[in-house]
Amino acid sequence: MQIDRDGARHVRYDRSHRGLPVVGGDLVVHRAADGRITGSDLAHRGKLVLPRVTPKLTRAEAARTAVGSARSVRGATAPAESDVELVVYAADAAPVQPHILGLLREVATNREIAAALHLSVKAVEANLTRLYRRHQVRGRAELVRTLGLAR
């Protein structure tokens, strides 16, 4: 759970499918300080349709792939095969608003945020509009102050 300076709470719920965790399948419910629900975000909309849950990779292949994907992380090493977990991957539709909020401190323009997240400027603008509405603010500066993101 994340609690903002104004007392608003954001509760994350995990999703599973046939007993497997769904990566990118989480639900976040937003509540105002008075407990009133102000909105929600579901990372993957719609029903998950999987004919089977047979893994595409062996544990060893998954461990090697993870390290290959994390080449930019200094000191990345392969996890032990026993630590590799079978999951349903639905992260392609993961919400971007938490990333946008993180970049508001560092980046000045919507164009820079779009470039950093590989989104269109219109997608950034639409997400910012939803954030303004959810937090009942009129713009970026007020959102940054309300959420305590100011440097």
Image (spheres, rainbow, N blue to C red):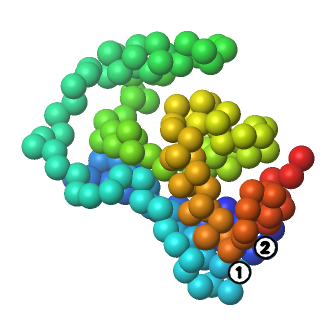
Q: Amino acid at mark 1?
A: Ala
Q: Nearer the viewer, residue 93 or 125?
A: 125
Q: Name the residue located 17 percent from the left edge and 49 percent from the top edge.
A: 49
Q: Name the residue located 55 percent from the left edge and 54 percent from the top edge.
A: 127
Q: Nearer the viewer, residue 100 or 139?
A: 139
Q: Counting other residues with Cα less than 10 Å from the Cα at mark 1, is it few (<14), some (14-19), or many (20 or more)?
A: some
Q: What secondary structure is marked by label 1?
A: loop
What number is the disc on residue 6? 2
Image coordinates of residue 117 in percent, x first then y, are 57, 34
Image coordinates of residue 87 in percent, x first then y, are 33, 39
Labelled pair 2, 1 in contact (Cβ < 8 Å) = yes
Image coordinates of residue 145 in percent, x first then y, are 84, 61
Image coordinates of residue 105 in percent, x first then y, are 79, 44
Q: Nearer the viewer, residue 146 or 73?
A: 146
In the picture shown, does residue 119 fall above or below 141?
Answer: above
Q: Which residue is mark 1?
A: 33
Q: Earlier in the sequence, mark 2 or mark 1?
A: 2
Q: Residue furthest left?
A: 51
